[in-house]
Amino acid sequence: MYQLAPRGSGWIFTILHAFQGGSDGDFPQARVVFGPEGKLYGTTSNGGNRCGTVFTLTPPPRTCESAGCSWTKTVIHNFSQSDGCWPGFGDLTFDGAEISMALQKRGANLVAESMAAVLFSR
């Protein structure tokens, strides 16, 4: 996950988070969205319990003047075969305190069976 910010006549490239796979998640494919409290919310299509994650990226507590300021990543949900898989194909949306998205429901052999809407509260 990265940020491009204008500076003078050029741009500053900043890595916000480098996904490591496993419990950290892997393959962020869908767009990220800003939540009401200023955090970025996104998904990975792999990692967690092999079925992807929902994560937040929290900005540094103050305005960062250098490219070295880090954001804090937190996994807020690990998908599994029982509640859906591969959320990287849908976009997150907010409705009050709930986050919703479309994802593929997977059977025991991880073959796509249907699309399902999943809602959960922050």
Image (cartoon, grey):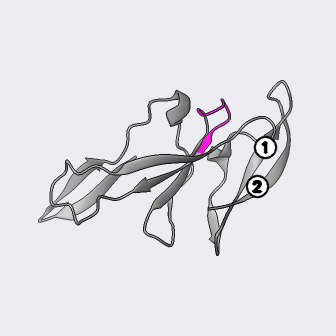
Q: How crowded is mark 1: few (under 14 residues within 10 Å), some or many (20 or more)?
A: some
Quadrant including the C terminus: bottom right
Residue pushed farthest left? Answer: 8
Q: Dot 2 lies on which element? A: strand
Q: Is the stretch drawn in magenta largely helix, strand or loop?
A: loop
Say whether residue 43 is left or right of residue 89. left
Q: Residue at point 28% right, 49% down? A: 70
Q: Give the residue pinned by disc 1.
A: 83
Q: In this view, does 105 lie to the left or right of 77?
A: right
Residue 48 image point, x, y percent:
60, 34
* Span of residues in magenta: 47-53
Q: Which amino acid does label 2 sit on?
A: Val
- Relative side of 107 to 18, left or right: right
Q: Indicate the secondary structure of the residue bearing disc 1.
A: loop
> Mark 1–mark 2 contact, CB under 8 Å?
yes
The residue identified by callout 2 is: 118
